[in-house]
Image: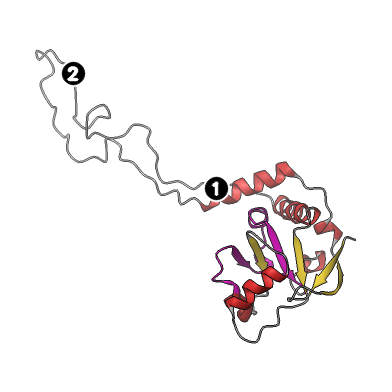
Amino acid sequence: MPQLTVKKISGGEAGSIALDESIFGVQPNVPVMHQVVTAQLARRRAGTQSTKTRADVRGGGIKPYRQKGTGNARQGSIRAPHFTGGGVALGPKPRSYAQKTPKKMIRLALRSALSDRANEGRIVVVDNFGWDQPSTKNAIAALGSLGIEGRVLVVIAREDATTALSFRNIPEVQLITPGELNAYDVLSNDWILFSQATVPSSQSESN
């Protein structure tokens, strides 16, 4: 199993932890990650765009001029698509962009993303955050002590309100709970910060 040094929030060492090899030690599958991330982003699209067809546009109920004798092409309505102010031909209508993705593929994409970050040394595990009061100043100091720069995904327990309040106002930090971990958020951040209680394992996934 891959070993990782557990750090204190001040930056010192606090032991080591054995990462689950089935989650942090797999060969990253790039095509699967790409497909899952694409599906995840597609699902976020609102799909509310809409244009009016000639049936939806107001007016045009009368033939604009007589059929013959004007020298013009025959027309039945001024709301046809080729008229200014007319309907739109083959325009977008509200739709869902959601893609069906197998659960096994979603899990493989997450494990591939976590393994990729582990291979790059971009995963940090602290023993605990241990703050009694929320403090953004302490959270910024902790990131500096741990040597974390850039965008960071902080994985916290759902009931850990103190840590959430400490990190939430830092622009480069994204907060997430273990149950919300996904491939896109892992790949879109430079660092992943866990506490010992939030490091994923195959046992926690089965629960």
| Residue 103 on image: x %, y % | 70, 54
Q: Which range of residues does the magenta coloring cover?
A: 167-196
The local crowd at label 1, few if under 14, some if 14 to 19, many if 20 or more residues have their Cα within 10 Å, is some
Residue 181 among those drawn in magenta: yes
| Residue 51 on image: x %, y % | 33, 41
Q: Are marks 2 and 1 in contact (CB under 8 Å)?
A: no
Q: Is the C terminus in the top left, top right, bottom left or bottom right quadrant?
A: bottom right
Please name the amino acid that badge 1 sits on. Answer: Ala
Asked whether the viewer can see residue 100, the reply is: no
Asked whether the viewer can see residue 163, the reply is: yes
Please name the amino acid that badge 2 sits on. Answer: Arg
Q: Give the vertical position of 166 relative to 75 (above or below).
A: below
Residue 194 among those drawn in magenta: yes
Secondary structure at badge 1 equals helix
Q: How many marks?
A: 2
Disc 2 target residue: 74
Which residue sits at x=49%, y=48%?
A: 96
Q: CA distance from mark 2 to mark 1?
A: 44 Å
Disc 1 target residue: 42
Q: Residue furthest bottom?
A: 132
Q: Earlier along the polypeptide chain: callout 2 or callout 1?
A: 1
Q: Give the vertical position of 119 relative to 130 (above or below).
A: above
Which residue sits at x=24%, y=29%?
A: 80
Which residue sits at x=34%, y=31%?
A: 89
Q: Is the N terminus in the top left, top right, bottom left or bottom right quadrant?
A: bottom right
Quadrant of res 182: bottom right
Q: Give the vertical position of 167 relative to 113 (above or below).
A: below
The local crowd at label 2, few if under 14, some if 14 to 19, many if 20 or more residues have their Cα within 10 Å, is some
Closer to the camera in the image, 100 or 157: 157
